[in-house]
Image (cartoon, coloured by chain):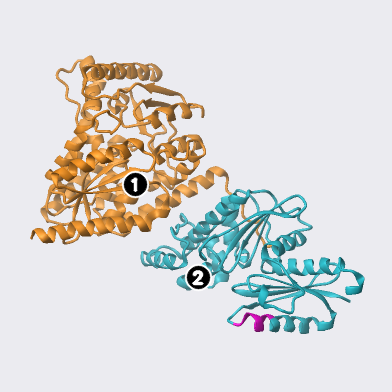
Amino acid sequence: MTDNIKHTIETPKQKQNRHKAMEAVKVLNMIKEEFKEPPKAMNYFYDLFERVYCKQEPLHADKVKVGTMCIQIPSEIIYALDGVPLRLCNGFYTDDEIGSDLMPSKSCPLVKATVGHLASGNFSDKPDIIFSPTTCDQKTKAGAIVENFGYEVMDVDFPRTKESEESREYWRRSVRKFSHDLSHSLGKKLTKKNLQASIQKIGYAQTLYHKLNDLRKNRFVPILGKDMLMVTNAFFFDRIDNWITAVEELLEEIEQRAKNQLHAGGKISPRIVYTGSPPIFPNYKIPLIIEQSDAIIVADETCSSNRMFNDRVSVDEWFLNDMVDSIADKYLKGCTCPIFTKNNDRIRRIIDLVKSYHADGVIYQAFAGCQVYEMEQRSVLAAMEKEGIAILYIESDYSPSQQGQLTTRVEAFIESLKNRRRMKR
Amino acid sequence: MNYFVGIDIGSTAIKVSVTDENKRLVGSKINASGSMFYKYAKETLQSLLDELHISQNDIAYTVATGYGRKLFKEADENISEITANAIGAQEAAREYGEIKTIINIGGQDSKAISLDNEGNVVNFAMNDRCAAGTGKFLDVVAMNLEIGVDELGEYHFKSTGTPLSISSTCAVFAESEIIGLLGNNHSVEDIVAGVHYSIAKRIVKLVKRVGIKENIYFDGGPALNTGLVHAIENELGKKIFVPKYPQITTSFGAAVLACDAFRTMPLSEQ
């Protein structure tokens, strides 16, 4: 027998952590090494992801952590009550595999990964309480599955129609109830002062994002989409004050780059608007393929990025009730998720992004099993065709295996966009 | 004294084992298969017999196995490498305990074999299509990294960072991935560990198809690589048993079978 006694075998937890670190490092290395020199200020974000996902470093040991199953839970209220919102939407294949044993095989990988992560209980920052909005079917059911693992899960009723006055009122009541429930379980009172402060803080974070994003409209795009995704993705879990400081620094550097007309892409890189199921670290598969194929993502319409920052809370009068209602409105009216019966807002927004960011085409990704994005594909494709906007629809999942085929499809689309451009000249 | 020969003609190496009547291993020899399987197989057997001072006449029974087994016409019998592997593993691990699962990584294929309580093969799975994640793959990796195959284990245990996973265990695509990693100054140690974990994950998937039952036996040339053993144990979350001579389990199994076959023959034919 060979001398294999000297090494010990990893515990299941160690094994999971190694798997996740291996996934994370692979993507981080790609992001850092396979593109033109990234902005220096991005190092904060690269390090942050490494600390959290490779070294399992906790960021919020001193705070009550409020897990959210979806973007629809208002962070403003959580911060006002001195909690930390942790967006639980997960992008790890390792967790997707764990979740596959707990959910039907054709479920959405994001939901499977989120459930798998919670089932493993393997967190650097473990949520103390979880709020689960009844948005899509799978997330709605996931909340109940997760409860079985011993988490305290509270539902937040979310309507499926957007335009009606009934749904507006319904959702306002849900948000009021949510703030009451959270206030109760954290033992803190929501006040005019603390809520105003948190609305303003998040509003400022949104302003920073918009300033940064505006520079992507330039002919010379100073920052690549893969870096923007990391910035927005960090907002899921980072300490908000650190995030703000880091983005302020990044903005300064990007403004300088824009002044110097520094271009992050190639000479004729097509400009892409990215939409569909949200890319969440480390599942940056499609965005990375796009930018490795000599295109630039200039804008996106996803809930992991643009939708998180796009609309601000607009308050008429700074009374507590008014603020809570305004927050509710922002989360309902600003939402372009395909869960709604009709979703013309989403189409309008994509067209608007294509025009204002001077995009050459749209790439639409749906996770296999993410039903609503799969279903809405037809209406979006038809609308784009009507507008004369080129669009590529891709279905993919979290497995690392289909890389080759996906690359070929994306490359062919990007080449066709380049040809279109040449024809125009 | 009667002796028994098991000869395993694999894609990469020819392995010959000789046992006595008590199924004890008397000697073994390993040679590269090269281009002329039959010729090299005969030569390997002859040189082993010369070393052991055994004459051809003392060979009572010969069993050939492996992918080139049908080319070896002198054999009294030939059997599949799956059966031979199962018999060899049980005999080799007799003192360790009952073997229920075998992992075999060969030169150009890999297998998982599941055994029942009587030691019969009940299920097995093989890699499909190509040589991804086999011995050949490790050869290519070592060559790209400019180290010896026998050094891979050492490098594995020196890895201090996160193992750098290789998405493709296809030898052709992995080559460009590895060159890319080297170009970005990643450490050879982390690459080696990453390669081992990539193979280990793949092999564990194969094992899961037949079911993981203890004890688990690991053989084939790559079992000499302690780093790979470590990676597979971590992926399985279980200890695995590696025999002293992992390359010859299958040929040893063939020799053991030869012994049994001879014993059950009518005396008149012996």
Which residue is identified by label 2? B142
The residues tagged by marks 2 and 1 sit, at their Cα atoms, a distance apart of: 37 Å
Span colored in magenta: B36-41
Q: Chain of mark 2?
A: B
Across and down, in percent, residue A164 comes to 22, 20
Q: Point out the frontmost of discs 2 and 1.
A: 1
Quadrant occupied by the N terminus of chain A:
bottom right
Across and down, in percent, residue A81 comes to 32, 22
- Picture quarter containing residue B109? bottom right
Using residue B27 as the reference point, say whether residue A266 is left or right of it. left
Is disc 1 on the same chain as disc 2?
no
Specify the amino acid type for callout 1. Glu
Q: Nearer the viewer, residue A95 or B33?
A: B33
Quadrant occupied by the C terminus of chain A:
bottom left
Which residue is identified by label 1? A395
Q: Residues within 10 Å of mark 2 (few under 14, many from 20)?
A: some
Which chain is displayed in cyan in the rendered image?
B
Q: Eyeballing the image, is A351 above or below A3?
A: above
Across and down, in percent, residue A391 comes to 22, 48
Please report the residue visible at 49 percent of the width from the left and 63 percent of the height from the top.
Answer: B192
Which chain is displayed in orange in the rendered image?
A
Q: Eyeballing the image, is A174 above or below A204?
A: above
